[in-house]
Image (cartoon, rainbow, N blue to C red):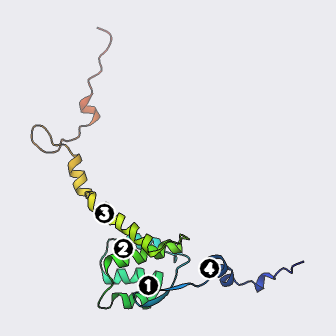
Amino acid sequence: MTARKHPIDDSFDAFWDEQHGGHRTTVVKGVTVVVPNDLPVGFGERYAALSDSSSDEDVAELIAMLFGEEAAEKWLAPPKIGTRQLMTVLLWGMAQASGDDITFAEALERVTKELKGKAQSPNRAARRAVSKKPSASTGGQSRPTSAASTTSARKSSRA
């Protein structure tokens, strides 16, 4: 019979490492980083909020949250990490943290598809402009009319 461990003797860190393969590391742009096995709290919201930003401070925040301050400092020091490289590494790291053990090649393929999709689809303003039809008389957009002005008056059935 196997002796059961006392709950206080269990280490969450040991349990988590056992579940996720321990603290694996890899080298990215000369920096040894721990492969993320969970997304930091608030990362998803910050990524969504900053995904269109090109500010070094915003990029550094995302890198640091996922890979640490050293990675952020070294990757953004001249010569800076390339945009496609950064997108590949961030996508790879987020996939790893979500339990999807993809390769860097698979991450680059996903990034390339996403970039091609963005290049082929028109932006929102262009889509909206195309969908609006001009008014026949002025060439401008038609004004909406209220229901009251388009309904006919009620007529009594009594003559």
| Cβ atoms under marks 3 and 4 closer than 8 Å | no
Residue drawn 26% across the image and 37% down it: 146
Marks 3 and 1, how far apart in space?
28 Å
Mark nearer the N terminus (1 vs 4): 4
| Mark whose residue sits in front, 3 or 1 | 3
Mark nearer the N terminus (3 vs 1): 1
Label 3: element kind: helix
Mark nearer the N terminus (2 vs 4): 4
Residue count near mark 2 (Cα–Cα under 10 Å), binned few <14, some 14–19, many ≥20: some
Disc 4 residue type (three-letter)? Gly
Q: Residue furthest left?
A: 138
Marks 2 and 1, how far apart in space?
14 Å
Give the percent coordinates (x, y) of residue 47: 41, 73
Q: Which residue is mark 1?
A: 64
Q: Nearer the viewer, residue 14 or 109?
A: 109
Q: Nearer the viewer, residue 9 or 102?
A: 102
Q: Nearer the viewer, residue 47 or 157?
A: 47
| Mark whose residue sits in front, 2 or 4 | 4
Q: Quadrant of residue 86?
A: bottom left
Q: Which residue is mark 3?
A: 116
Q: Which residue is mark 4?
A: 21
Label 2: element kind: helix
Disc 3 residue type (three-letter)? Lys
Quadrant position of the N terminus in the picture: bottom right
Q: Which residue is mark 2?
A: 50
In the image, taking residue 22 as reference, residue 116 lies left or right, namely left
Residue drawn 25% across the image and 30% down it: 150
Disc 1 residue type (three-letter)? Ala
In the image, taking residue 142 as reference, residue 18 lies left or right, namely right
